[in-house]
Image (cartoon, coloured by chain):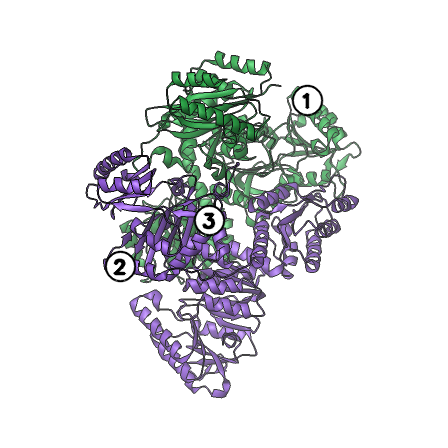
Chain colours: A green, B purple
Amino acid sequence: MLDRMFDPNAVAVIGASRNKGKVGRAVLENLMAASDDIDIIPINPKDEEILGLRAYPSILDVPREKNVELAVIVIPAKLVPGAIEQCALAGVKNVVVISAGFKEAGIEGAHLERECVALCEKYGIDMVGPNCLGIIDTASGLNASFAANMALRGNIAMMSQSGAICTVTLDWAEKTSVGFSKFVSLGNKADLDENDFLGFFNRDKDTSVIAAYLEGIKNGPDFIKVARQVTRSKPVIVVKSGRTSVGSRAVSSHTGTLAGADAAYDAAFRQSGVLRADSLAEMLDKSRAFSAYPLPAGRNIAIVTNAGGLGILAADACSNAGLTITSLEESTIAKLREALPPAAGLYNPVDVLGDASADMYAYALRTVLADRNVNGVIVLVSPQAMTAVGEIAEKIVDTVKSSDKPVLCNLAGGTRVQEGEDILHRNGIPNYPFPERAVTSMYALCEYYSIRNRSYVPPDEMKVDRIHAAEAIREAREKKTRTLGLESMGILSSYGIHVVDSRIAKTLPEAVRISEEIGYPVVMKIVSPDISHKTDVGGIRLNLQHADDVERAYNTMMSDVRHYMHNAQIAGVQIQKMLSGGKEVIIGMNRDPQFGPLLMFGLGGTYVEFLKDVSFAVAPISIEDAKHMITSIKTYPLIAGVRGEQPSDIASIIDTLMKVSQLSMDFPEIMEFEINPLMVMPEGKGCVAMDVRFTIDTK
Amino acid sequence: MLDRMFDPNAVAVIGASRNKGKVGRAVLENLMAASDDIDIIPINPKDEEILGLRAYPSILDVPREKNVELAVIVIPAKLVPGAIEQCALAGVKNVVVISAGFKEAGIEGAHLERECVALCEKYGIDMVGPNCLGIIDTASGLNASFAANMALRGNIAMMSQSGAICTVTLDWAEKTSVGFSKFVSLGNKADLDENDFLGFFNRDKDTSVIAAYLEGIKNGPDFIKVARQVTRSKPVIVVKSGRTSVGSRAVSSHTGTLAGADAAYDAAFRQSGVLRADSLAEMLDKSRAFSAYPLPAGRNIAIVTNAGGLGILAADACSNAGLTITSLEESTIAKLREALPPAAGLYNPVDVLGDASADMYAYALRTVLADRNVNGVIVLVSPQAMTAVGEIAEKIVDTVKSSDKPVLCNLAGGTRVQEGEDILHRNGIPNYPFPERAVTSMYALCEYYSIRNRSYVPPDEMKVDRIHAAEAIREAREKKTRTLGLESMGILSSYGIHVVDSRIAKTLPEAVRISEEIGYPVVMKIVSPDISHKTDVGGIRLNLQHADDVERAYNTMMSDVRHYMHNAQIAGVQIQKMLSGGKEVIIGMNRDPQFGPLLMFGLGGTYVEFLKDVSFAVAPISIEDAKHMITSIKTYPLIAGVRGEQPSDIASIIDTLMKVSQLSMDFPEIMEFEINPLMVMPEGKGCVAMDVRFTIDTK
């Protein structure tokens, strides 16, 4: 149905006006300027004709045979619900509500907005907005917006949650000749949101790149599902702003503290294959690259330049981005040597020298592109005395059009490269004003190539004892016990996670008895609902070898704990088998308001807090996601085994992550948990949860 | 004398030509176009007149009363030494050698270049180049270059090691109306280099900002000295390219491996107060900010915008950069409330709304600037339907001119903000095309404010036993012992660094005897010139409690070491007192080819390798440098004391760093060393070197 919204037979403007400065006039003018085909129908109770068009007092007065497929609404907010109802009666199934004064304006507006949504649901109407700039479709010639600039035709579909960002982007795009297939101002996203448009843009034959400016995501889990699908066929580049605002997440655990407000977005984008841009400029740069070029089949880049300095800057940027300045084949170098002057740089970066002609550039470019080691080329042109920038630009256009590898350009300078830049832009090829921006965009092409080629296998349902876990959680909720410690290891057990042999002692004699039963050496830990960081208060004693050790440990621990936290309620001590030869890792979960369960993985120990060397993923995770979580921390070599040390049992960490992912999905009542440490034994020997802490929603 | 080079009474062009396309003509034309005051004298044996100017066959033929103070040389390389000699005879003290064909062209060229330098030294001539684009002075009206664009007048002095980067920058600057005081193409830097020009630009009254593109630094230690002085009064922004090229440094130690090729540049820039830019664009952005604005007295930033989306993007960027989106004073908010519409955002970011007039912008800007919490303002303007971008730009100009706080602008868009951008540029105020770039530039202003206000106290000479250390090093050199291990702890001792009680045993009985003497518990380490990573081969045993332990450790160690390295030459085992209760840190030194001794500091342990959580500084270091080294690692809280743990003795680490800094300066023969670990005891208890490894230059 969205197809009809963007390519309607007729469009009605409810609130059309002849008065200059009125949005209702701007929309009408934009519609008229953009298309001769679409029947444009002003709706206004006071006029019979506006700007030469026959006007109707109400949408209900428009003859049915006009087949109005879209209504653009630009009347005061309080009249909008009525207008939507009339649209429904008139059989109009798509509305774009430009009017402001809804949720963004306060309680009354929010109420009006809910009313609109209810009507849309009742009548099966699709609504964009409210509080938006409108929509544009350059293929059908629809400009149902009050934007001052009409988009040029192109293959980038863009959506933006900010109307002003739409304005800025359209104005910037006009100057830089960047074209769009569709342009959507999302407004308050009361009905249609980013997920709807992701799907729509994916089906749209005029769109090959999707760009978005988002301040939030309405439905996180759905976004991941939809985006994962869309990024299989089209690149999606998103600027998500509000990175640094403090989220509403509870932060009583490491996971929460380390995640910050933005980790869930990063994880969700990564898992779904969305390319996150750090700025508007980067989003636009990258979108332009995708709009103009095929994907490079690898990360081996060649540079062709007439200026050593630019070449070095580009090579630096490649290296920083993780792209390889590849070695050229012998035959390529020989071919370059044939034609280039003796002082030229034949190795990568290829320096054709300051006086290189357009033909020389073309020759070098063709030669380098033919090299099997090269996946993509960066061309740099500085306007030297002899440099025919325009001719070079024409050669670049020819090369780009006939090449199945990307050739990104930086004609560097200002006035003297303008002609060349214009030639590139006229041909739909971006000119990046500085070498680093060409490189960043090349990196995005490479990154997306990897994303499109990676596999996604949804996680299998694992066999677990869900009833046992449900029972433990139900009990905690009944007792209003918000925090569960070691005593809840059973929940992990029931999900097939090995837990350490561990029992609680309420007295010293009991502690000694349990130690004897478990077998030395043992570890002793304080058990208290009031103590979350046991080490801080002297609440942990390691490597107790015999009964004497247990006795001394018990006595000093009680005195230490009393000293630090004299009001703490102490339930006893935990005695557990001391394991050695393993590596301590931490696995946590914290529920993100947008995306749900956010899993964390990192190495255990005090370091984790200062170095923030942890990784995140949104549950449910795939095995690939789990692997990525483990391998993407910087200290991964310590787990994988370095310097002759045995590799740890990574398979068992993956298995544990998959299990806690499922646990998080199965029980929304678990707000947070943290297995800390999970002791990972050498390869083949599994892993064991040594301690755990659950936070249960008891409300 | 450089003053005369840039403002000469008369300038001779040796190799002047009337032929189009010749560099000798381009230089002449540029000189003529730029000035009416400077006497321009073509030198060419074949012509009596060139472009209407009286020409002379040789510089020696020019009448002395012409007072030629600069000669620009554009003749074939092999003729240049002769020309320099003639300049000397003619009393010309400054030459700019544009000609190429010197060091960059091979051995013969390098020889010619050395010849030129020798002549300059002999005759006291200052030379720019060879192989350069020339020099420009916009104040005196000197354009002694073959650049296609003349620089506009401004207060930025720029030097570049790449001629093409000069070309690109000048062309870019013309389009964006950026002005320069001086513009210098450094070329091969055979005589005058960045250090000379730093000093000269610092004395130049027309210059208030110094920008540089450098591919290397000729004299690192001098650079630090000069730059440290210059940055006290003028900001210096440098792009140093070639970041990622592999340096020539030896990398047999942690320090070397972790430093990479670029750490010394980073350290040197930081220590000397130079702002390093990551790209040409960033250098230009930042230079423009310094050229237009006063420094902010702190990092509290306010944002004024007519678009929520842009405001959020700017706030994100501030937060990422470490700038604070400050709270506004009550009175400011009240004053904003008086005039702004009800829906406006009164808190920071201040949102004047999409239909804000120029007066409204001016009001908001003035109000926010008057707030005592605000050190600087970012103004964002999106071209909405009602936005009078030109008028707003004029208000911004007025505000900037009357404000003692910086106001950085982003008129965002393209065509529709062009008029506003032109107004800003005409008034010497940069328009940053995206909000993030305004923020990055604001950050540079804040950073430089801190740099200018920090203190620098040169290190005191410490009392050390230099003779003892010299003796040990001399002995190693005589014996051609390149690597010294534990046996060289005496070198540290003689510099007043505490070392652990530690002796070498060649046999098991000796090991037991030494252990008894030192007192249990002890540590045993393998001693072998062939083994650098002792842990890898089982060459360390900890916590040996009695003679039995020593015996078992000795036997298994020998078998382990033999197993891993059956050819290793084993000198015995080291027995040392086992200390506990301290934190292990690592201090290293590696000699950088450019800057000399590069000191490293980090936490000990395996983590250091994977997390690269280390800091660097070039010796000699000040106490402030030492403090910065310690506090700038991410794991600093572990040393400072967290969670009730005792703080470590940081004063003793500073003291050790100062001592090894002096040791590195005193003995250039020490190529590398590494104290690993240095055991740092709790505050007041000092620190102890537990192991050390020196690499001595035995050649």
Q: Amino acid at mark 1?
A: Ala
Q: CA distance from mark 1 to mark 2?
A: 91 Å
Q: Chain of mark 2?
A: B
Q: Nearer the viewer's eye, disc 1 or disc 2?
A: 2
Q: Is residue B287 visible?
A: yes
Q: Nearer the viewer's eye, disc 2 or disc 3?
A: 2
Other residues around mark 2 within 10 Å, as few (<14) / some (14–19) / many (≥20): few
The percent position of residue A570, horizontal first and vertical second, equals: 55, 22
Q: Chain of mark 3?
A: A
Q: Which mark is residue A438?
A: 3
Q: Is residue A675 above or below residue B330?
A: above
The percent position of residue A7, horizontal first and vertical second, equals: 59, 32
Secondary structure at numbered mark 3:
helix
Q: Chain of mark 1?
A: A
Determine which residue is flagged by label 2: B475
Other residues around mark 1 within 10 Å, as few (<14) / some (14–19) / many (≥20): some
Q: Amino acid at mark 3?
A: Ala
Whether residue A131 sits left or right of residue A204 in the image: it is right
Q: CA distance from mark 2 to mark 3?
A: 56 Å
Secondary structure at numbered mark 1:
helix
**In the current view of this chain or complex, which residue is farthest to the front?**
B517
Determine which residue is flagged by label 1: A118
The percent position of residue A580, horizontal first and vertical second, equals: 36, 27
Q: Amino acid at mark 2?
A: Glu
Q: Is residue A381 above or below residue B104?
A: above
Q: CA distance from mark 1 to mark 3?
A: 47 Å
In the image shown, does A500 or A5 lie closer to the viewer?
A: A500
Q: Is residue A203 visible?
A: no
